[in-house]
Image: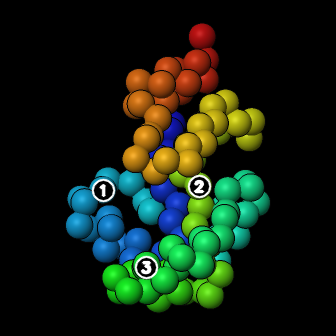
Amino acid sequence: MTTLVAISPQFAHGSLTTVQTNALTFDVLSDVGNSVARRFGLAYALPADLREALRSSQKALPAINGDESWELPVPATYVIAPDGRIALASIEVDYRKRLEPDVILAALKELQPA
């Protein structure tokens, strides 16, 4: 059995809105404060000029994410084996570039018993 989850730094209601707006069929978990992202070494603080740009466009992170850290997680994809081992890890600073589904499916297939 495979479980797909997404983790977002947004408040839970923001994650729920994302699920509903995009008709997602998997859970989107809320990581307010980026504690999970920090444990994976993925959290980074936005520079001052970007913070100001987000404030001026009404997208200030404290209101969206619920803390004053101005941190975001670097987008990452993990396939975690039943024994807890990370079978596949992909970390991409450019949020527009995502791991191809075929790569993820191949990693999952390798975890299936022979």
The answer to whether any part of residue 102 appears in the image is yes
The quadrant in which residue 34 appears is bottom right
Q: Which mark is residue 38?
A: none
Q: Image quadrant for the C terminus? A: top right
Q: Earlier in the sequence, mark 1 or mark 2?
A: 1
**Cα gap from disc 1 to disc 2, whole angstroms:** 21 Å
In this rendering, position of residue 107 left or right of residue 57: right
Q: Residue furthest front?
A: 49
Q: Reply above or below: 33 against 73.
A: below
The foreground one among 62 and 51 is: 51
- The residue carrying mark 3 is 54
Instruction: Check disc 1 and report its element: helix, strand or loop.
Output: loop
The answer to whether any part of residue 5 appears in the image is no
In this rendering, position of residue 9 left or right of residue 57: right
The foreground one among 14 and 83 is: 14
In this rendering, position of residue 110 left or right of residue 101: right
Residue at the (36%, 73%) spot, across then down:
16
Mark 3 vs mark 1: in front: 3
Q: Which mark is residue 24?
A: 1
Q: Earlier in the sequence, mark 2 or mark 3?
A: 3
- The residue carrying mark 2 is 74
Give residue 72's position: percent from left, percent from top.
Answer: 58, 67
Instruction: Check disc 3 and report its element: helix, strand or loop.
Output: helix
User: Badge 2 local density, few (<14 within 10 Å), some, or many (20+)?
Assistant: some
Residue at the (43%, 78%) spot, across then down:
53
Residue at the (53%, 61%) spot, across then down:
7
- Label 1 near label 3: C-beta < 8 Å? no
- Label 3 near label 2: C-beta < 8 Å? no
**Amino acid on which disc 1 is placed:** Leu
Give residue 57's position: percent from left, percent from top.
Answer: 34, 82
